[in-house]
Image (spheres, rainbow, N blue to C red):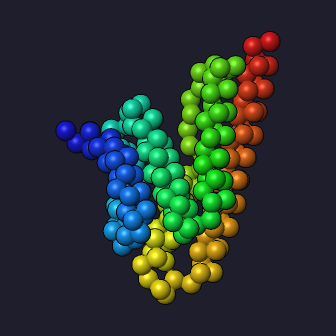
Amino acid sequence: MLQYLPNCLTFSRLLLAVPLGLLILREQYDWALVIGVVAGVTDALDGFFARRLNALSRFGAILDPIADKVLITVTFVCLAAVDVVPWYLSIAVIARDLIIVTGAIAYYTFIGPFEFGATKLSKSNMALQIAFCVLVLLSQVLDTIPSELTLAGTAAVLFLAAASGFDYVMSWTIKAFQSRKTKE
């Protein structure tokens, strides 16, 4: 039974996106913060347990980034909808993911199947986005969070989203050219 724990944690994170988004839209930031922290913890625990229990699965490898993207997208869109973060930040976060997905579809269509894995930069990007969302929710609950910290977080999220998106585009472009060369 324990081999299903990582996927259950990942699936719970996917399900937490709905209440998190609703709580943000209702401006119930204290409860949104609790849900956000729980979701962040499940993100850390699912990978830990998958490795520890040797319960790595193809399903989990596919579900994990989907759960991450759904949760992050819902959070950023809802935070922008209530004017807690600027829309340009939400658009940048979502645009990066759309570019990566579009690139993966193009690669698959024109080059062929591939093994996809998150880079260290991409993992750092996700960790920063989760931490930033927690910081933003915390700043809505506590008056003691300096606005400069949120502004610095905004800049960091923008920078890392751009850098990790560029990293994916460049590395997959290189792989595409190398694949084409070996086929010739």
| Vertical side of 3 occupied by 18: above or below | below
Q: Is residue 49 visible?
A: no
Q: What x and y, as percent, mark residue 1?
A: 19, 38
Which residue corresponds to the image point at 56% horizontal and 29% vertical from the top-left? 115
| Residue that lies at the very extreme toward the top in this rendered image | 184
Q: Residue furthest left?
A: 1
Judge whether residue 24 can be spotted in this image: yes
Q: Is the residue 179 above or below the residue 173 in the image?
A: above
Look at 26% across and 39% down and name the residue there: 4
Residue 158 falls in image quadrant: bottom right
Figure disc tally: 0
* Front in this rendered view, residue 151 or 178: 151
Relative vertical location of residue 169 with respect to residue 9 in this rendering, above or below: above
In the figure, is residue 63 to the left or right of 119?
left
Q: Is residue 180 left or right of residue 124?
A: right
Residue 123 in percent (x, y) is at 55, 52
Q: The C terminus lies in which quarter of the figure? A: top right
Image height of 25 relative to 53, above or below: below
Left or right of 53 on screen, residue 110: right
The spot of residue 77 in percent (x, y) is 53, 55
In x, y percent, where is residue 85?
58, 67
At 42% from the left and 38% from the top, the residue drawn is: 63
| Residue at the (62%, 41%) spot, across then down | 98
